[in-house]
Each structure stands twice: as structure tokens, then as C-alpha cells.
Amino acid sequence: MTDNLSLKAPPIDALTRQIKYHYRKKDKFIEYLVDFLSQPDAEKSVCKPCIKRWGLMPHVDIPDEEKQSVALWMFKNFR
Ligand code: HEM
């Protein structure tokens, strides 16, 4: 069993819940995520404690279409 102290980044289910709290609608959820992946920014963060704990994540260098796919997958598969 892994304990939560050894996590290197926030768990995806917790992140999805947090994003949905701020961006309830699918379109807004995707818009937030595509933007954050392109240019992570503490000001736009939906989890300030995450940034305190781990530091800001690196930007994810994949095409926007793939960012949209990941975002839609998260929206559909986690509550
Ligand atoms: C498609 C890939 C990825 C997705 C969808 C993703 C998604 C996210 C999201 C939504 C957050 C919360 C952002 C916020 O603060 O509002 C986050 C945080 C974080 N991610 Fe990622 N991430 C990805 C890749 C990565 C990679 C490659 C790393 C490290 C090598 C990483 C490390 C972190 C860390 C340390 C945090 C907490 C600090 C922060 O919020 O910036 N992530 N991630």
C-alpha cells in the first residue's frame, strides 16, 4: 500500500472533483484544462494547496486536440 505522503502530484479523482467544483459545465471544464496544461499558472489554479506542496506542474507539450481528449476523458470518468 502506498501512503499519501509519497505522492508526487495530486490524484486525478481529487483533481477532477476540484475542477468540477469551479467549472461545472463540460465546455468550461475542458477550456480550463486545455489552458492550464498549455500554461500552468498559480493564479489560475483550482488547488492552491497542491502548488504549495509540490510546486507548479510543468506545461504539457501535446497538441490541443489531445488536451481536449484528456479533459473529456477526465470529465466523463471521474466525479
Ligand atoms: C496530460 C497530463 C496531465 C494532466 C491532465 C494534468 C492535470 C493536472 C491538473 C488539472 C492539476 C491541478 C492544476 C491546478 O492547480 O489548478 C495538476 C497539478 C499538478 N500536476 Fe499535473 N497534469 C498532467 C501532467 C503532469 C506532469 C507531466 C507532471 C509532472 C511531471 C505533473 C505534475 C503535477 C503537479 C506537481 C501538480 C500540483 C501543482 C499544480 O497544481 O500545478 N502533471 N495536474
Image (spheres, grey):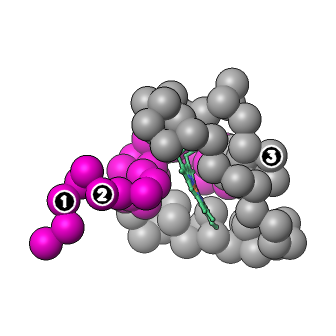
Left or right of 39 on screen, residue 19:
left
Task: Report the magenta residues as a range.
Answer: 1-30
Q: Does the magenta portion include 6?
A: yes
Q: Quadrant of residue 18?
A: top left
Q: Which residue is mark 3?
A: 39
Quadrant position of ligand 1: bottom right
Mark earlier in primary sequence (3, 2): 2
Report the residue at 43% width, 30% height from top.
49
Three-letter code, disc 2: Ser
Q: Can see residue 47?
A: no
Which label was assigned to residue 3? 1
Image coordinates of residue 53 in percent, x first then y, are: 44, 37
Which label was assigned to residue 6? 2
Relative depth, front residue between 35 and 39? 39
Q: CA distance from mark 1 to mark 2?
A: 6 Å
- Helix, strand or loop at label 1? It is loop
- Helix, strand or loop at label 2? It is helix
Q: Residue furthest top?
A: 43
**Which secondary structure is most common in the magenta stretch?**
helix
Q: Which mark lies nearer to you, 3 or 2?
A: 2
Image coordinates of residue 78 in percent, x first then y, are: 39, 63
Three-letter code, disc 3: Gln
Relative depth, front residue between 36 and 30? 36
Q: Can see residue 7?
A: yes
Q: Quadrant of residue 6?
A: bottom left
